[in-house]
Amino acid sequence: MIKKVLVEVSSILKKNSLQNCKKIKNLLRASGLGDVECNTIEPLYGLEGNFSLEEIQRIAQELLCDPIAEKFIIDAEPKDFKTIFLDVWFKSGVTDPVAESVLKAIRDLNIMTIENAFFGMRYEFEEIAQAREKSVDEKLIFFANQHLLNPLVQQCQLIKYS
Amino acid sequence: MNQLENSATETISFISLNHEALSRLSKEKLLSLSLQEMLSIQNYFRSEAREPKDIELETIAQTWSEHCKHKTFKGEILYTEESSEGKKEKVYDDLLEQTIVRATLELKKKFCLSVFEDNAGVISFDKKQAVAFKVETHNHPSALEPYGGAGTGIGGVIRDILGVGLGAKPILNTDIFCVGEFGASFSRGLEENILPPERILSGVIAGVRDYGNRMGIPTTNGAVLFHKGFFANPLVFCGTVGFLPKDKVKKKVSAGELIVSIGGKTGRDGIHGATFSSLALEKDISASVVQIGHAIMEKKAMEAILRARDQNLFSALTDCGAGGYSSSVGELASGCGAKVYLENVPLKYQGLKPWEIWLSESQERMVLSVPKENLKKLEEICLLEDVGCSVIGEFTDSGRLEVFYKCEKTCDLELNFLHKGIPKVRKKAVWKIFPQQKICEVPKINFYKNPSFLLKSLLKEPNIASKKWIIKQYDHEVQGGSVIKPFVGLRQNGPSDASVSRPDLSSWKGVVVSNGINPRFGELDPYWMAANAMDEALRNLVSVGGDLKKCAILDNFCWGDVSHEEILGGLVRAAQACYDFSKIFNVPFISGKDSLNNTWRDQKGEVLSIPGTLLISAIAIVEDVRKCVTMDFKKSGNLIFLLGETKEELGGSMLYDLLRLKGGEVPKVNGKGAYAMMQSLQKAIQAGLVQSCHDLSEGGLGVALSEMCIGGSLGAEIQLPSDLNFSDVAFLYSESSSRWLIEVEPKYLNRLKKIFSSAPFTLLGKVKNELTLKIFSHKKRIVNLGVLEMEKIWNSFSEKQ
């Protein structure tokens, strides 16, 4: 079972996120996706194993985020039909140094139930003008492969409102 | 081909194959071996009366790759020079030995402790310590995955330093990136798998930053060049300087010692990396050739190795780079023999075939030769540093490389054949010299109509503009030894010529590192490009106070498709210049590397080569870092002198690049004159007579003056010489070699005149408190620019990123 822990940055660091969102907005427009906004870009950690919710909360609180400047959400979902998450991960077999460090640190916390860790980025997009069409999903994946990830070593996954 | 039952390895039907089948096999298996090489291998296995196994063919292919064996440089080249006077021919039996290595051997410098034999060159620092220097490239991986490619580029060269002698402590990094012009992607269109230059550069910067910073190594020196020729094939040069005790410079492997692997686990990362580096960048390249580095793992391995070194726990080590264990164990065992048991190699995941384990280029691994009695202590250190440590085999005296996997012998090669059996490559090279290449008039620009326009335009050119956005991402301070960093001046905004560091904090002795590179000159004549690159590296080094008598240089050739005779001709000319000017400058080469076949296929299917590029990296010892100088103006009223002769040499200049002009006269280096001036300048700096010094390179005098004003937050008033026999534009923006601007207190004038009595030495003007750069010609003001305005323009490219 894989649970994902989303580390959401607080207002101090959001400034950086907003700057990056602005850059992506320009790229979206240049790619014919002017009706799509990029709201946030956040680090994403995937944890795999036979763990308890308390353990995940402890890992997130003590390891994955700075409780003063950041907050975390476990298994976040898009809030409405207009919101789309695009998660970028390394492909299987590619060295994931952040995840390796996370796994080591989890062991140092004496939590032995986590078997695997993954590190990625979550882009939250929002359609601002029209109802979401299937072609937007395809366009977003094409856009991500062009600008947000390197398909040679990374892959992406769209997560929609359900 | 047939698969033996229950065998982890594949036996290849090989010894009876015809020429066509051999060539096909080489291509299908990505071996990158020529027919001639395949035939040599076939003869070897015929003499052994057996078919090879897949792992054996792969081992030979890796060992014989261009990356590992430098086949072109060490091959036989028939060079023909064609000019209006006729043809001249010269045969090089071994280009590397007859040019670069030859110069070093002839110079016989006692301070050179290890040259061209180990992972890096080593020179003496003081009575007990030495410094090692290595610069590598990681071009193809960086083109495909810039972050991972560049990160593993710097990670790899750091491991070279860790693996030199019995291990050196990395003390600084230097990085030079050559990328395509920004915005070019929109006009050219993008081929699949080709990333735009903007994405390549941002990924490369981040990759080097994340690796170097996390390793705790300062990045004190570097450069970034933009040129359309690097559109899809960037050049990523990564260099590291290390510090080691003199009694740890040599290594020796003995039969009976254990082969121990330290560091990361093995996966499928980077398989075929060495052979891939010899191929053109095309579609459908496997992700397995790209690696993502893990700096923290390497940091832990580094700490373990340095601890073990100081306790004399191993007698040799090397890094696992291109070719993985096949290359590292093969190299260490070259004088004896080795038995390796692949099942002992720690794996990231199951399912790897024996040849994949053997050839994997997974990062952060080092191979050590450890006497059995020291193993326990070594394991304790590795446990303490939380780093993997596995015995994977034993060195023998068999003269053979034997590899086993679960009791099955998968590889049994004679080491002499593996290292010396490669047939010599024979190639032809041509260079055509015709007078029309040199003729190009200085542009008829109405300079006086808009007197500051050219200077402002040049200051915002990406090749000249500040690289602040990149430099500020790197840690320059860690380890506490950095003296002169990439930015200097009161507000730390002037671009430094070279870096100065103190590897031993109990001493004022320092290490100077600089570089020289200019591919635009190479488009006109690679010979003079090489001469200029050497001149630039050395004049940068001397600018801060480096000692030419304790100086050594490194070469890094990055070239295009060397199967093309004229492209190879350029390479030969550049190598010949390396010999000529190494001798004239009295500075030896201690290490180097070549990366050939830097090409890519465009949308039309045409294979394009990068412009032939030579990076010269220089390192020198400075006796007292307190005597070093920086390039920022220091005080109003001080005199400004131009040292060196300016000629109407605008070929390959930034001015011509700005104006999109081709041709012109490439700057020629007067080696003997340049060497004499460098010695005089060094003497003046050591005597404390020079307050600031800046070399003249891209953008010539005009840009150098602007940068000194920006760095010092001071202005200047300049009067151009009245006896020029060419235009003011040419004087201001010529990129003639061997020139410096120096700032001198008026009281030192007479002493300085004596030192420079036989050198071209021209008083240009004075440093001023008023924040304006004013340039006069024949009493008419031709430039009048505010320093703050110049700074804003110079920073504008960086601000946009």
Image: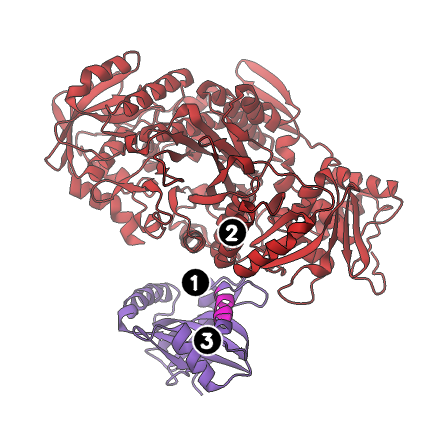
Chain colours: A purple, B red
Q: Which residues are magenta?
A: A98-105
Which residue is most to the bottom?
A: A162
- Category of crowding for the residue at label 3, using alpha-carbon neighbours closer than 10 angstroms: few (below 14), some (14–19), many (at least 20): some
Q: Is residue B386 shown left or right of residue B674?
A: right
> Regarding mark 1 in the picture, which secondary structure is present there?
helix
Which image quarter is the N terminus of chain B in?
A: bottom right
Along the line of sight, which residue is nearer the eye, A35 or B260? B260
Front label number (1 vs 2): 2
Which image quarter is the C terminus of chain B in?
A: bottom left
Q: Is residue B99 shown left or right of residue B339?
A: left
Q: Is residue B707 above or below residue B378?
A: above
In magenta segment, residue A100: yes
Along the line of sight, which residue is nearer the eye, A61 or B793? A61
Please provide percent x and percent y for residue A150.
49, 61
> Regarding mark 2 in the picture, which secondary structure is present there?
helix
User: Mark 2: which amino acid?
Assistant: Met
Q: Is residue B681 above or below residue B330?
A: above
Residue at numbered disc 3: A137
- Category of crowding for the residue at label 1, using alpha-carbon neighbours closer than 10 angstroms: few (below 14), some (14–19), many (at least 20): some
Disc 3 to disc 2: CB gap under 8 Å:
no
Chain letter of the residue carrying label 3: A
What secondary structure is the magenta-colored segment mainly?
helix
Residue at numbered disc 2: B302
Please report the residue visible at 61 percent of the width from the left and 45 percent of the height from the top: B317
Chain letter of the residue carrying label 2: B
Mark on residue A147?
Answer: 1
